[in-house]
Amino acid sequence: MLEAKEHFHGSDLEKIEKYFGIPKDRITAFGANVNPLGISPRMRRGLASHIDAVSAYPDPEYTELRGHIAAYAGCRPEEILVGNGCTELISLFIQIHPPGKAFIVSPTYSEYEREIRLCGGSVRYYALQETLDFQLDTEDFCRELSAQRPDICVICNPNNPTSTAVLPDDMRRILDCCRKLGTFVMIDETYAEFAPENAGVSAVGLLKEYNNFVILRGVSKFFAAPGLRLGYAMTSNLDLLAEIRERKNPWTLNSLADVAGSLMFTDREYIEQTRELISSERERVFRELASWKNVKVYRPWANFILVRILKEGVTAYDIFLHAIRRGLMLRDCSTFPGLEDETFFRFCFMMPEKNTELMECLKELLG
């Protein structure tokens, strides 16, 4: 029996290995939200033949890479800034004009608040409501924006950990409101590529209409390449991009990441296989869990699903322990502000047989 609760994040495999004595190569990381297909085959083959790239500095403008990203994402190359992962880009866009007041949709990723506070700003949260299935009430949100008048508004879309999404018509209303207030909007689209294509979750199409927002993405989740530390930002505010480039350290993206990005963004077969797999498993898992009486699930838009336990006497930590003993690692969400009541857990969609294995494991406590 463990003496105290220990909480783990999705990438804490080494910590779990030490704590539970389970070799990390025998753990299925349902908490990491990473593409189960692994890295792009085209990138795997191509990097070996481009290893000599490390003997030269990359193009400081990353012209070829930005061209491939633009073709993939649907924007213009000049609207793109690349960086050392989304974390660096979050920091750059916050530091360039440090916000005095920030308004963040929650529960969500903690790095936004950390960067804002490091720059001396204050943070207010807009809490998504469980009674609305964690869907954003756009009208109420805009009222709060008008009342708070923040310098920056941060929205993760689809949101982590709720897997809910703001669709373009509602995002347009938010951008209109923020434009009137002089509020800059940061939209983290880390998980947007997993969303159903016909839903149009991404705000890329709004770049032609608004220059008061930035979209942030990376390759850690969809392309299963967190170690590359490749992130990119998209905004039509070209003056802001020019200002950031003047202050940004050169070559924060290394030569291999530059080459790798050019390869993975053009691997159409891999991209389509990923979308088909996630779409199929998202619907299958959602339908299965929705039929259980002891849980509540929220329709997911990303590659993971949030689950609420309705069975008395069972906590998210109990579920975590039960699963990890089978080598299945999911995420106890009680460390997210707003989900502290210990009834919420989250897991991502893996290969079909592994998803089935996890649901059979969960059913032993929740069936």
Image (cartoon, rainbow, N blue to C red):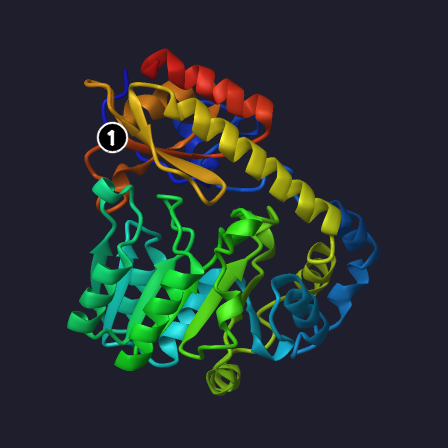
Residue drawn 35% across the image and 81% down it: 97
Q: What secondary structure is found at the residue carrying circle 1?
A: loop
Q: Quadrant of residue 51?
A: bottom right
Report x, y in % for residue 9.
39, 40
* Placement of the C terminus among the 4 image quadrants: top left
Location of the N terminus by quadrant is top left
Position of residue 92 measured from the top left corner of the image (x, y, whole percent): 43, 73
Circle 1: residue type: Thr
- Residue at x-position 48% and y-position 87%: 239
Whether residue 328 is situated above or below residue 7 in the rendered picture: above
Residue at (57%, 38%) from the top-left corner? 278
In this rendered view, identify the residue nearer to me: 222 or 49: 222
- Does residue 181 appear in this view? yes
Whether residue 221 is visible: no
Horizontal side of residue 168 vs 101, given as left or right = right
Q: Residues within 10 Å of mark 1 (few under 14, many from 20)?
A: many
Which residue is drawn at the image coordinates 35% and 26% (left, top)? 320
| Left or right placement of residue 165 versus residue 135 in this view | right
| Above or below: residue 310 compared with residue 193 | above
Location of residue 96 in the rendering, given as x and y in whole percent from the top left corner: 39, 80
Q: Quadrant of residue 47?
A: bottom right
Looking at this rendering, what residue extends furthest in the left direction?
Answer: 147
In the depicted structure, whether residue 279 falls above or below residue 251: above
Looking at the image, the residue that sits furthest to the right is: 49
Q: Position of residue 75 (x, y in %)?
A: 60, 71
Q: Which residue is mark 1?
A: 343
